[in-house]
Image: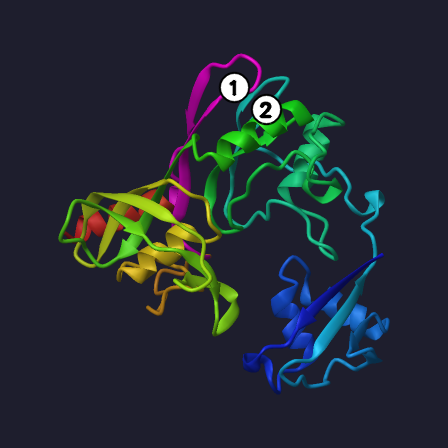
Amino acid sequence: MNTTVFKAGTDDNGRRVDMFLAIQLQDMSRSYVQKLIKEERVRINDKIVPASCKLCAGDMVFVEIPDASVLEVVAEEIPLDILYEDDDVILVNKPKGMVVHPAVGHTSGTLVNALMFHCKDNLSSINGILRLGIVHRIDKDTTGILIACKNDKAHSRIAEQLEKHSVTRRYYAICHNSFSVTEGTVNAPIGRNPNDRKKMAVNYTNGKPAVTHYRVLENFQKHALIECRLETGRTHQIRVHMASIGHPILGDENYCNVKNTYHLQGQTLHAGIFGFIHPSTGEYMEFSAPLPKYFEALLQKFRNVN
């Protein structure tokens, strides 16, 4: 049993405790947060409260979170688009809509469930049962390459490369608005949005350094296809950076205020290239994943208009 403590800020004054926790505990589903409250595992200043209880600035919110059980995450026979696999690593082309790892109260249909079935007991355990094999992640509605590790030695070596930003990562995105330049760099720190804790934002006060290099591959009348190269790996980095310079990613439900008229499921963002030093051989390896069919269809539609 773990007890987590949150302090309500001035922006949380008058906010219901269930809504507050839904923002703070983003790895948990809202239904699981409600379950914790019903089981009297949530207290405000040491007083058990209902979900409708409203906070005051400065309130301390205590949440008792039961330990995750190994049995909560099970192997599932989910098809994987495998780009490469050996005794140390496996690289997959993640489809749109697939969550990378389970969250408490939501433990099925994820990439981890699929990897557990495919790799059996051969997955690194450094990040715990809910993140078996996972060294890094991409958003649910972002497609493309993700590397997972089959043992702790490989995990440590790949994690070190990610931490040192020595891996090659290139993403492809369709943005709103054509560009007047062919390439550029966004160097702006990213942190929690002070006005909406569910979102990230360019935050010069509390953000962490973030650098995205972009190159325009095609300009259309109202959109553009770009390639992005990451120096850092902050949460929602490309999505936040491109929105900050007036080119939000098409379909992005969090950072784009333009109405989605193409019936898209989330952002048109694809992790297309991933390169790394193999943890055992020391050889540099690089892999690519083709653009999804829906992505190609959109590009063709924009080309036909030009």
Q: Secondary structure at mark 2?
A: strand
Q: Is residue 305 above or below residue 132?
A: below
Q: Secondary structure at mark 1?
A: loop
Q: In the orientation shown, which residue stands out farthest toward the top?
A: 281
Residue at coordinates 33% horizontally, 46% vertically from top-left? 212
Where residue 248 sits, quadrant-wise, is: bottom left
Residue at coordinates 76% horizontally, 70% vertically from top-left? 62
Type of residue at label 2?
Val
Is tag 1's residue or tag 2's residue first in the polypeptide sequence?
2
Q: Is residue 237 above or below residue 203?
A: above
Q: Are marks 1 and 2 in contact (CB under 8 Å)?
A: yes
Residue at coordinates 16% horizontally, 56% vertically from top-left? 221
Question: As drawn, is 112 to the left or to the right of 226?
Answer: right
Residue under pointer 1: 278
Q: Nearer the viewer, mark 1 or mark 2?
A: 1
Q: Position of residue 243 (x, y in %)?
A: 33, 60
Q: Is residue 265 magenta?
A: no
Crowd rating for badge 1 (residues with CA inside 10 Å; few <14, some 14–19, many 20+): some
Where residue 250 sits, quadrant-wise, is: bottom left
